[in-house]
Image: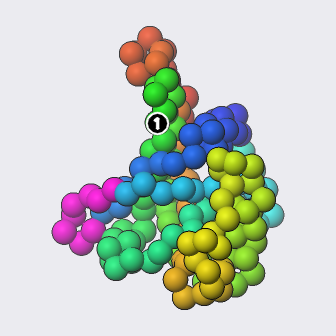
Amino acid sequence: MVVQKEFLDRAHRIVWCTVATVGPDHRPRSRILHPIWELTDAADGLARRDGGGLVGWVVTRATPVKVRHLGFSPYVSCSYWEPGHEVAVADCEAGWVADAATRQRVWELYRDAPAPLGYDFWSVFPDGPSGESPSLLRLTPYRLRLADVETLSGRKVAPAWN
């Protein structure tokens, strides 16, 4: 749970991350996205080694490229980096969520989070969370990695969870 908590803290401090997918041509494509993460308990079906879980959410557009790539391989790699060389990487299974209640809850999760993590999507998606344009991606990590100047230089081992 320590790696999960540190990952969440770094991700929410850095905010924007590079998310890579792989398409049917076996070529990667990356884009910048703004996930929000939450620690959950095992009661929601996301059992982990330590009984807890981390789930990421991305309000985005289901573009043809994203839909095609996730249809081919439902896995993404989310990489956060900041100029002081703190790094957080989550390799995840990703899936589209159509459930209206979940979409509304995540919309409010973003809205209520403090800036710069928090974001009001009404300016981008005026029809709200139930509109046709916004889509919701759920990210379920299967591997987390943390790095900093010491680990990147080889002076210490990077913490990981998988």
Q: Is residue 154 left or right of residue 2?
A: left
Residue under numbered circle 1:
81
Q: Residue furthest front?
A: 123
Instruction: Point out the stretch of residues depicted in magenta.
Output: 23-30
**Does residue 93 appear in this view?**
yes
**Residue at coordinates 46% horizontally, 36% vertically from top-left?**
81
As for residue 95 lying within the magenta part, the answer is no
Q: Is residue 18 left or right of residue 36?
A: left
Local SS, label 1: strand
Q: Residue furthest top?
A: 155
**Of the residues shown, which amino acid type is indicated by label 1?**
Trp
Q: Looking at this view, is 108 or 91 the one in front?
A: 108
Residue 36 screen position, x and y as percent: 63, 55
**Number of numbered discs present?**
1
Q: Residues within 10 Å of mark 1 (few under 14, many from 20)?
A: some
Residue 108 screen position, x and y as percent: 75, 68
Q: In the rendered image of this protein, does residue 24 appear above or below residue 27?
A: below
Q: Looking at this view, is 127 or 39 the one in front?
A: 127
Q: Is residue 61 left or right of residue 1?
A: left
**Residue at coordinates 56% horizontally, 72% vertically from top-left?**
124
Q: In the rendered image of this protein, does residue 13 appear above or below residue 132?
A: above
